[in-house]
Amino acid sequence: MTDGRSAASNKGMPMVRIVQETVPCECNLKDEADAGIRSAMAQIIDALTKPLSPEEQAPKRKEKGTASRVAFKGQLEEFNRFFYKRGWGDGLPLLPPTEAAVREMLAGTDLPPDHVVGKVVPRQGKATVEKIAINAVMAGALPTHMPILIACTEALADPRAHLGAYGTSTGSWMPFWIVNGPVRNDALVNCSSGAMNPGNIANAAIGRTMGLIVKNIGGARKAIEDMGVYGNPGKYSCVAGENEEMSPWEPLHVEQGLAKEDSAVTLFFPNCYSQIWQYGSDDKGILNTLIYNLPPGRSGLTCLLMTPTQAKTLSQKGWTKSMVRKYVYEYGRVPAYRHPVFHDGGGWTGRSPETVSPGAMDAVAIVPSTEHIRVLVLGGPGAFMGLACGGGLPGGAFVTKKISLPSGWGKLVAKYKNLVPTYERY
Amino acid sequence: MNTSADNRGAEYEVLSPWADADPVPLRGITPRPADLAGKTIGLFSNRKRAALLTLGAVETELLEKFPATKTSWYECSTINTPEMLTEGKAKFEAWVAGVDAVVLSVAD
């Protein structure tokens, strides 16, 4: 109910009358719906007929106006506890966003601090460059990550990303950030072995910053507006670069319409990421691994993760990214009885009375179209493949934003280029 | 930044990560009818799975309790999008003008 209240407030009607009933979520049983509504009917009638209170007629704003720029002064532990209790953290320790630290972060952009990169839903919070930098400092990001973070914020604010739905959904969708172009190497984004592991500042801190931005700028807080049933550890960070140097194919951002020399970030919201041992080292073994493991219940944006070795095997047999997408679309099918379309008419888009239900054994495509599929080459040696499966909201897409680098970028990169772990051998 | 125990005495003046948002003009809710008898109650479906079932149950209960009441259904044109921002805006406005009160099922 808290999310409904926040949603109503965001639309300027904080006093909308909300009745909480006991019908199970996503219920499709008439008896249960009838019983739940029957028990709430007195409240529903009351909500429809009770005279308005003065506040319902002329609601007052609950949130204070412009927040103070300085939030707190105190010691490290006190600052962390204060921010945590205000709901501004993510459970891990934060670094203090002091004036000096934020100024250093702003070296990663030529944009002025008050420039509004976008408004982030559901709260329509203004993502100024300074607010992005503050959250970046808190998350442990480096100034060389700022250009990426600004592009990430642009992607979040793009309606095609559907942050308003995925960022608050009971489905616990996680933002998957894919970095392409020269900035990957400049910002030390891991694209190779363990690209999705913790361990690199960029992969960890970029995702963590964006998680804080979703909360502190977008206003999607756990169990208040973000109603994810299980939640998702990927909301801490899910960032990887494409291993362009080892890939035989054009990189993702080129597929998305940018030039190879551009740097870019691509966003979509999977809610699962699974890894599968490849069925064979030839092209058929690799492709069949993907089509046999597509989850029939997802039916949305789907990112196929493969290693440079797998990509090279396919490329040597004449496969392109586009051909792989087409193959997975065409052959990624299941008998209808294993697909939601057989049970509920096919999800959001297939419930019109004209929908013809397939026969139980009819082959049904799992992914709606080739446009719902992208191929990402990353990772190191090994015989595993990956599937990141997202939702299928109408108008949704892989959202790619070009990254703009600031003047003096070379010097900034040089300043942080040696900030890499050196592991002692044993 | 040094976060060691030796540095714990240091004080930090920290900036707020919470964004400003342009204030949305607030509106009160629509005055309610004193009685539902003879009124037209709108039933708005957001097309989620439980919407038709729950609103159907509301309709059944309303018609039982207020036999002279009428209902008028509306189904959103685009999932997860305010109807006023869709191509259904004109149709939606005409529908709202023809009802005395509305029940929307979130159906999540």
Image: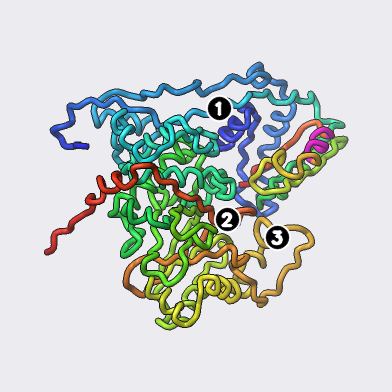
CA neighbours of label 3 inside 10 A, class few (<14), some (14 to 19), many (20+): some
Q: Which mark is residue B22?
A: 1
Q: CA distance from mark 1 to mark 3?
A: 37 Å
Magenta span of residues: B92-98
The residue at 50%/33% (across/down) is A126
Task: Assign the N terminus of chain A to one quadrant of the image.
Answer: top right
Q: Nearer the viewer, residue B28 or A71?
A: A71
Q: Is residue A6 left or right of residue B55?
A: left
Is A336 rendered above or below residue A425?
Answer: below
Earlier in the chain: of badge 2 and badge 3, it is 3
Q: Amino acid at mark 2?
A: Ala
- Secondary element at image label 2: loop
Asked if residue A45 lies in the magenta stretch, the reply is no
The residue at 88%/35% (across/down) is B68
Q: Residue A269, image x and y in percent?
A: 50, 53
Q: Are marks 1 and 3 on the same chain?
A: no
Q: Residue A237, image x and y in percent?
A: 38, 50
CA neighbours of label 1 inside 10 A, class few (<14), some (14 to 19), many (20+): few
Choose mark 1 or mark 3, whichever is in front: 1
Residue under label 2, please give it: A397
Question: Is there a contact, CB below 8 Å, between mark 2 and mark 1?
Answer: no
Report in which chain the residue with disc 1 lies: B
Q: Residue A387, image x and y in percent?
A: 46, 66
**Coloration mode:** rainbow
Report in which chain the residue with disc 3 lies: A
Q: Amino acid at mark 1?
A: Asp
Q: Nearer the viewer, residue A281 or A356?
A: A281
Report in which chain the residue with disc 2 lies: A
The residue at 62%/75% (across/down) is A335
- Secondary element at image label 3: loop
Residue under label 3, please give it: A350
Q: Is residue A205 left or right of residue B29?
A: left
